[in-house]
Amino acid sequence: MTETGRILLEPAYLLHRTSYRETSLFLEFLTREHGRVSVLGKGLRRKKGAAYAVFFPFAPLRVSWSARGELPILTDVEVVAAQPLADARALGCGLYLNELILRLLAPHDPHPPIFEVYGQALHRLAAGDEREAVLRNFEVLLLAELGYELPLECDIATGDGLDPGRYYRYIVEQGPVAALPDAGAVRGSALIALRTGVFSNADDLKDAKRLMRGVIAHHLGGRSLKSRELFKYSRT
């Protein structure tokens, strides 16, 4: 569904941009009140002021657009503050967050909590926080806001609370079941860390990453993520 009218100085982040014809850009923004929106930046490739703003990666922006036609037209964009991601690994993480939003969030579906959590994740990445923990926290909160909350409270077979010392097999869209410590099982402590957002050791981060990769793949319907390729070449 396309919105109509003029939107003025809406808080936003740029998710993706592609060239459009010889002088323009096709832009995808995550906005606080309008969700994911696509707008056309006419002539941006030959303008310095506005073009500078949309080439500033991961910076908080304020954008204005006119939505009278089929494709909204960008009318103004301002950088609120710089948000530098200093190294290649952090940059790859930011691109991964962007691709998740582009793949999972429907256009014009407002989710202010996603906007806030995304901004917090970028801030943590820029500050040098543990990157894998930042990504796992974002994935869990994004899925929950979209209606795909992960059941992480108890063993779904027995109703018992999760034991940090036991292993569990996680069934997507159902929850964890106690299991032997084989290749497909994850530690109870990793599941608890996903629920609380607090990771205390590398083993839990490793288990959580493996679990969340499967969960994300399920919700993507088998589609691959291009940003994951960057991690192969940006390891520190």
Image: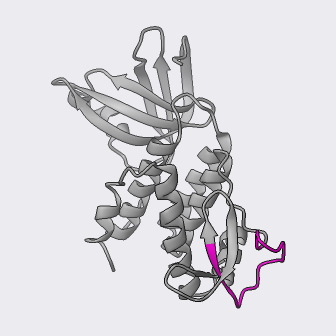
Q: Position of residue 106 (x, y in %)?
A: 53, 34
Q: Is residue 141 left or right of residue 90?
A: right
Residue 87 appears in view: no
- 137 drawn magenta: no
Q: Nearer the viewer, residue 180 or 124?
A: 180
State whether residue 149 is above or below residue 187: above
Q: Nearer the viewer, residue 228 or 38?
A: 228
Q: Quadrant of the C terminus?
A: bottom left
Magenta part of the chain: 155-169
Q: Position of residue 117 (x, y in %)?
A: 62, 53
Q: Main secondary structure of the magenta part?
A: loop
Residue 27 appears in view: yes
- Residue that lies at the very extreme toward the top in this rendered image: 68
State whether residue 108 is above or below residue 203: above
Q: Residue at (59%, 80%) from the top-left corner?
A: 186
Q: Position of residue 31 (x, y in %)?
A: 55, 36
